[in-house]
Structures are given as structure tokens and as C-alpha cells.
Image (cartoon, rainbow, N blue to C red):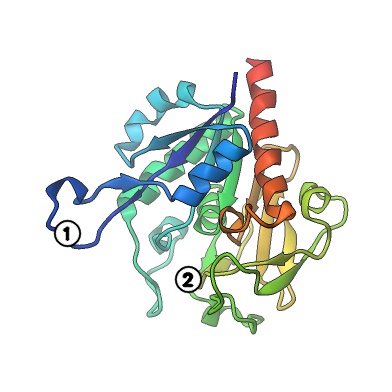
Amino acid sequence: MRPRIALPADTLDEATNIINERNAAFAPRPAVEAIVKAGGLPIILPSVDPADVADYLPLFDGVIFLGGADVDPTFFGEEPHMRLGKTYRKRDLFEIELLKQAVAANKAIMGICRGLQLINVGLGGTLYQDLSEDPNATLKHSQAAMGNQPSHHVTVVSGSTLATLTGERPYVNSRHHQTVNVVAPTLTVTARADDQVVEALESKDSDQILAVQWHPENMYKHHDESRQLFKNFIDRAAKRIDRD
């Protein structure tokens, strides 16, 4: 059986004359294709009432939290910074509950960009609402280069799961203006940019969670390191099928 992978959806909030596209739930095509190419079966979950998460849980073996709007800062006890971007509280509520129940059920978890930030907040960490708040941030983390091209290097902790997949000095793409501040208690930092901005998080005591601040779904077609991230995720989800 192919591992079933949940992709919590984003919501189309642009003006449209087509009634069926108004507030439509969607998942980015590159992420869907990367999951399929790695051997998974994608299942897109719209943002619904968090009370419905328990009914979704038996449908998947792994969940990938994707990019999108900023995380609402009230979830980590702060009021909005003047440079906070667009937020969507309904998505945050659904995804945080999905994360908590997926962790408790030992589902495989991957995070990409906002997904890394959401995972950190959902498990008790905090964010810098804008990189201007981080006293160390000096690199360009929202690249002007094409999105499927790398723009800066990161240094990966030797011996981490990530290091076995990407090596210790991968060249990655980057488009974010928020970053991790306080790391959640059950997570550990396994990669940083040269200005010390957090670029990856993993579970401390298991292989359950691996999250990166960059966008491997945009680079997997031409970069083996990105393909390895998705293959590892599908492998982790498959292990959980065997345990059931």
C-alpha cells in the first residue's frame, strides 16, 4: 500500500468572478507532484472545524505542512508586529489541531517554510514576526532569484537526519520573512543559515518530524537533495503503516 499523505490546503482569497473559485481550497501542484514522485498518495484536506480533525486522522499515514500566510502571532502570545504579513486564523486553528493529533498518533510529519513555523508554534515555540526583529539576520531570505533556483547555503548539524539527506552544506532556495525565535521543547535545530537564522528542525527523540525553512518542492526535479527529503518523508510514513 502506498503511504497516504495529507496536505492541509491553503485558501484562494483573491477576487474572482467565478463563484466556484471563491475561497477555494488548494494545494500547490509542485508539492502534490513531489509526493507522487516519491511514492506517496496525496490527500488534500480543506481547513474545516478543528473538531473534525479526529475523523481525518485514520485517512493518512503522514502529513506535510506547506507554505502560505504568516502564522497568527496570538498563538504564541504576541500582538501583531507592524511588518506582519497576511494571516488566516481559520487555517492556523485547523493545522495546529491537526499537528497535535498527528503527533499523538505517531504520524510522519514534514514541514516546508510556513509549515516549519507552524510546527514550532503548535508545539510551544515562538517566531520572530519579521526578520527585522532578529538581531542576527543579515542575509536575503526572500530571494529575487527564480523560485526553483537556490540562493544561499545552510550549515547542517553533523549526524542529524537532515545531514544524511542533504549533506552538511546544501545550497537552498529561500522566500520567507518570519523565522523561529524560541524553539519548541520537543524539537531541535539541525540547520542554520550563515546569519544563524534557523533553517531546519527535527524531533529530539524520534524520526517523526523533519521540517525545513526552504522550498524543496520547487527544486526536486533538478536537485537530488530535495528529492531525498521527500523520499525520507515517504519512507517514514511507510514505517507507520507497518506498525498499524
Which of 103 and 19 lies nearest the eye of the viewer? 19
| Residue 84 location (% of width, % of height) | 40, 73
Q: Is residue 126 above or below residue 3?
A: below
The answer to whether residue 65 is seen in the rendering is no
Q: What is the spatial separation of the Cα atoms under label 1 and label 2, in whole angstroms?
A: 30 Å
Residue at 32%, 57% in the rendered image: 88
Whole-percent x, y for residue 123 in the image:
56, 47
Residue 39 vs residue 25, the one in the foreground: 39
Which mark is on residue 37?
Answer: none
- Image location (x, y in percent) of residue 103: 57, 35
Residue 178 in view (yes/no)? yes
Name the image quarter holding the C terminus: top right
Q: Give left or right: position of 19 versus 168.
A: left
> Which of the two marks, 1 or 2, is nearer to us in this view?
1
Local packing at callout 1 (Cα closer than 10 Å; few below 14, some 14-19, many 20+) is few
**Which disc, if any, is residue 129?**
2
Question: The residue under label 1 is which amino acid type?
Answer: Thr
Q: Disc 1 marks which residue?
A: 16
Secondary structure found at label 2: loop
Q: Residue at the top extreme?
A: 244
Count of residue discs: 2
Residue found at x 53% / y 79%:
144
In the displayed structure, would residue 81 be above or below residue 211? below
In the rendered image, which quarter contains the N terminus? Answer: top right
Check disc 2 and give the amino acid type: Gln
Where is residue 80, by image quadrant?
bottom left
Measured as percent of width and height from the top left, residue 48 is found at 30, 38
Outermost residue toward the front in this view? 222
Mark 2 burial class by Cα count in 10 Å: few <14, some 14-19, many 20+: many
